[in-house]
Image (spheres, rainbow, N blue to C red):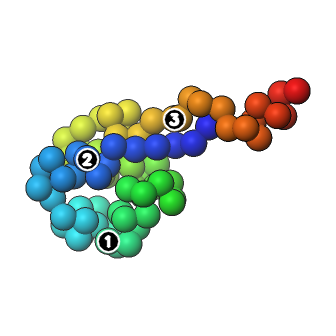
Amino acid sequence: MRLLNTLKKNRRYRNITQQELADSTSTTRQSIHSIENNKSVPSVSLAILIADYLKLNVEDLFYFDKKKSDQEIFRIF
């Protein structure tokens, strides 16, 4: 399972730039970009800081993709 997110959608809805979010959570704009594009997974503490800044629950931002990949299905058999 992969961890996915709705960060970009929620950030844009609130008219917050990646840089503003990065500054408010003591991270870099590049980290926010990587998280939004599912290239990296935030630490638990960063996920909480992001959710708090956006006034959302962590569960509203991050969720698992429940679809099994071909490799995961192959391992079952």
Position of residue 19 measured from the top left corner of the image (x, y, whole percent): 23, 70
The answer to whether the residues at label 1 and label 3 have Cβ atoms under 8 Å apart is no
Residue 50 visible in the current orientation: yes
Cα separation, mark 1 vs mark 3, equals 24 Å
Q: Residue at label 3?
A: 64
- Residue drawn at the location 33% of the way across and 43% of the way down: 6
Q: Is residue 17 left or right of residue 49?
A: left
Which amino acid, by three-letter code, is at mark 1? Arg
Q: Are marks 2 and 1 in contact (CB under 8 Å)?
A: no
Residue under the image location 18 percent in, 53 percent down? 12
Q: Quadrant of the N terminus?
A: top right
Quadrant for the C terminus, please: top right
Residue 3 in percent (x, y) is at 52, 43
Task: Determine the residue positioned at 15% across, 47% down.
Answer: 13
What number is the disc on residue 29? 1
Q: Which residue is labeled 2 in the image?
A: 9
- Can you tell which quarter of the image residue 5 is in? top left
Give the distance between the C-alpha atoms of the residues marked 2 and 1, in whole angstroms.
16 Å
Which residue is drawn at the image coordinates 11% and 55% (left, top)? 15
Q: Nearer the viewer, mark 3 or mark 2?
A: 2
Q: Amino acid at mark 3?
A: Phe
Gap in angstroms between the C-alphas marked 3 and 2: 17 Å
Q: Which of the numbered marks, if any, corresponds to residue 18?
A: none
For the question of whether residue 24 can be seen, the reply is: no
Instruction: Look at label 2 and name its amino acid.
Output: Lys
